[in-house]
Image (cartoon, rainbow, N blue to C red):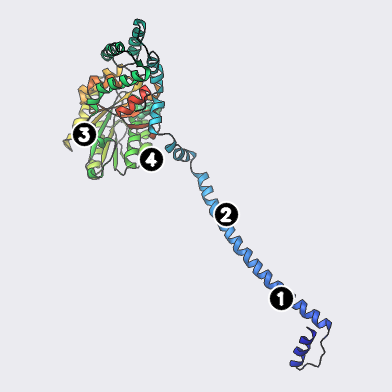
Amino acid sequence: MIAIIQSFYDALGLQQSANMGDLLGLLSVLFIFIASIFMLLGRGGSQVSLTEEKVAQVSDEKPEAKERQVEPKAEKVIEEAPKVSWGDRLRKGLSRSHGQVWGRLGNLFSGGALSDEQLEEIEELLYTADIGPQTATELTEAITERAKQGDFTEEKFKSFLFDFLKEKMASVHDNVDTDLYQFSEENRGKTKVIMVVGVNGAGKTTTIGKLATKLTAQGANVVVGACDTFRAAAVDQLQVWCDRAGATMIRAKEGSNPSGVGFEALKTAIDEKADYCILDTAGRLHTKGNLMDELAKSKNVLKKLDETAPHHVLLVIDAITGQNAIRQAEEFNRTLNLTGLIFTKCDGSSKAGSAVSIVQSLKVPITYIGVGESVEDLNNFNLDEYLGALLDLRV
Ligand SMILES: Nc1nc2c(ncn2[C@@H]2O[C@H](COP(=O)(O)OP(=O)(O)OP(=O)(O)O)[C@@H](O)[C@H]2O)c(=O)[nH]1
Ligand SMILES: [Mg+2]
């Protein structure tokens, strides 16, 4: 190495002889040079990785921060929706009716012959099932006949009951307009008018909110008329639902004429080529003649804009009402010619069996069933599903 340094000095024409000190000096310079290069590379590398780390951190942080900002409810809905199917919600909702009536009835069947006491007990239970006295009598007779053949186990009894009740309701449910719950593109712009009526607190506004949400989620344009002009709070309640659903709401001042609001709502819906126009009405007792007449007027005024409107007049029935619901339904039907029923609050009552007698006596189908307060708790009424849940039978 010293010789190399000496030849370097000679080439430069320097009169100096290379020694050990020069060698050490050169080595130190070289070491510092190489170390500096490594340091630079090292810092550059760590800078890149730091930048990457930072990016990773930031991109990691962002969704986390967002997630924290998202209302816990939204997270819950996303989590819950696939977990609790409609079938399970319905079964849970009807579990009271099943437990207090239908399940107890099933326990009496063991496959052997039925004693007179057992038959009496069955008859008594059927009268508490809210299926109506006529159906209860018919069913008791049918059970007595069937029991004579023997081999009447609980499972066979359930199937027997399923068939019996289905036969009572099926013909009424054969022709339900699917447009009520399923928006079809071929009906785009053909405004379907749905008027919703019922006694106070039956669940009209909530059901309309859920329905509007379901329809807009399918891409339908929905206009809602807040015809309950008696209470400002009722209109505000509907506004919240419509805002959430992305539906247009037509409202008027408190105390305005409800027929006028319905008319305006339909006019807007027709002008905007909306797919649905849903009218919320104020709750009223079926025994109040003047209020019932007002409903008839609200219905008729719509015909000035579309003579086929309203396409549906749906009566909301609170399941808790039990047998009294038949009287309500008869009165509303007489005034308005109902096209369908909405059976709500089946979760809070053991009287869901009353659906059977209401459908039978009115010959009007149930279009929707409600088993709770959230959007997912409303669905179209399917007879097999309903009877299966009521009798706890897998169909
Ligand atoms: N548990 C349960 N509650 C329901 C159901 N449907 C509606 N509700 C509740 O019933 C209450 C009354 O509902 P509304 O929608 O305001 O009833 P409404 O018929 O519009 O009442 P009025 O306009 O006062 O006649 C609200 O607290 C709803 O959340 C249901 O299926 N199950
Ligand atoms: Mg209301």
Separation of marks 4 and 1 at Cα, in angstroms? 68 Å
Query: In this rendering, which labeled residue sits more in front, label 2 or label 1?
Result: 1
Secondary structure category for the residue under label 2: helix
Numbered tag placed on residue 33 in the rendering? 1
Q: In which quadrant is the N terminus drawn?
A: bottom right
Query: In this rendering, which labeled residue sits more in front, label 4 or label 3?
Result: 3
Q: In which quadrant is the C terminus drawn?
A: top left
- Would residue 308 be visible to someone looking at this image? yes
Label 3, on which residue? 311
Q: Name the amino acid type tagged 3.
A: His
Q: Name the amino acid type tagged 1.
A: Phe
Local packing at callout 2 (Cα closer than 10 Å; few below 14, some 14-19, many 20+) is few
Label 2, on which residue? 57
Numbered tag placed on residue 244 in the rendering? 4
Q: Earlier in the sequence, mark 2 or mark 4?
A: 2
Query: Could you say where residue 252 lies in the image, as x and y percent from the top left?
Result: 30, 36
Secondary structure category for the residue under label 3: loop
Q: Residue at x 40, y 15 (%)?
A: 107
Q: Does 64 sit left or right of 160 as displayed? A: right
CB under 8 Å between discs 4 and 1: no
Query: In this rendering, which labeled residue sits more in front, label 4 or label 1?
Result: 1
Separation of marks 3 and 2 at Cα, in angstroms? 57 Å
Would you place residue 216 above or below residue 24 in this image? Answer: above
Q: Name the amino acid type tagged 4.
A: Arg
Query: Could you say where residue 350 lies in the image, as x and y percent from the top left?
Result: 38, 19
